[in-house]
Image (cartoon, helix red, strand yellow):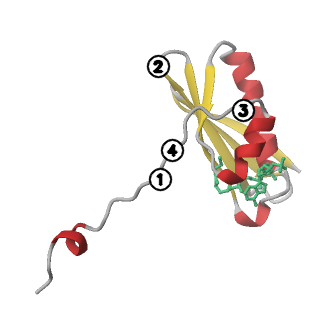
């Protein structure tokens, strides 16, 4: 069993922390950020590896949705997601807006300089 604590990190970021009631350990989190033009962006979903697949994210996700419905009812909600959670987002009423590329900056020395 978990409980969910809601923390206002600053004026634009609200964090949801899942705490295991029996151990008092933090087992997961998710957050959202309030942006310009009545836009909300979901972010920072993470469940500790040993606690995955037990529905903890689902509970956090629902708590976040409820909080937004109550406090920011007319905001547009966006989120980045990966392949593993795409069907979950679709089931929650989201659809794909754009597809993104994940890029990584090349190592400057190995790419551009010859080591002598
Ligand atoms: C994605 C993640 C937050 C899911 O947490 P979880 O508590 O295991 O998820 P739940 O048990 O509540 O299940 C919710 C949905 O997450 C997905 N999910 C479940 N287990 C998962 C796993 N081991 N790996 C990836 N996705 C998983 C499924 O889509 C599931 O929906 P379904 O039950 O309808 O199939 C967790 O695996 C994680 O922290 N992954 C690494 C960080 C990450 O990818 N964050 C971005 C999320 S958009």
Q: Which residue is mark 1?
A: 102
Identity of the residue drawn at 24% across and 75% down: 110
Q: Residues within 10 Å of mark 4 (few under 14, many from 20)?
A: few
Marks 1 and 2: in contact by CB < 8 Å? no
CB of residue at label 4: within 8 Å of ligand 1?
A: no
Other residues around mark 3 within 10 Å, as few (<14) / some (14–19) / many (≥20): many
The reply to whether the C-beta atoms of the residues labelled 4 and 1 are less than 8 Å apart is yes
Sequence-first disc among 2 and 1: 2
C-alpha gap between disc 2 and disc 3? 19 Å
Q: Nearer the viewer, mark 2 or mark 3?
A: 2
Work out how far the residue at label 1 is from the one at label 3, CA to CA, in angstroms.
26 Å
Whether residues under marks 2 and 3 lie with C-beta atoms below 8 angstroms apart, the answer is no
| Percent position of residue 77, x then y | 63, 26
- Relative side of 20 to 100, left or right: right
Q: Residue at label 4?
A: 100
Q: CA distance from mark 3 to mark 4?
A: 24 Å
Q: Callout 1: helix, strand or loop?
A: loop
In the picture of the structure, the residue carrying the numbered disc 3 is: 64
Residue 111 location (% of width, % of height) = 23, 71
Place residue 96 in its image quadrant.
Answer: top right
- Camera-nearest residue between 8 and 98: 98
Task: Give the labeled residue for mark 2.
Answer: 36
Q: Are marks 3 and 4 in contact (CB under 8 Å)?
A: no
Disc 4 secondary structure class: loop
Which is nearer the N-term, disc 2 or disc 4? 2
Q: Nearer the viewer, mark 1 or mark 3?
A: 1
Residue placed most toward the observer, 75 or 67: 75
Q: Residue at x 81, y 60 (%)?
A: 23
- Residue at 82% across, 58% down: 53
């Amino acid at each position: 069993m978990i409980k969910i604590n809601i923390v206002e990190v600053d004026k634009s970021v609200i964090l949801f922390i899942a705490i295991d009631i029996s151990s008092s350990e933090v087992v997961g989190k998710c957050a959202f950020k309030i942006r310009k033009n009545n836009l909300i962006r979901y972010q920072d979903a993470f469940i500790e590896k040993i606690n995955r697949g037990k529905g903890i994210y689902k509970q956090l996700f629902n708590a976040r949705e409820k909080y937004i419905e109550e406090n920011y009812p007319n905001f547009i909600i966006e989120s980045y997601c990966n392949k593993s959670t795409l069907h979950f987002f679709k089931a929650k009423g989201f659809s794909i807006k754009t597809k993104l590329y994940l890029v990584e900056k090349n190592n400057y020395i190995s790419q551009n300089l010859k080591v002598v």
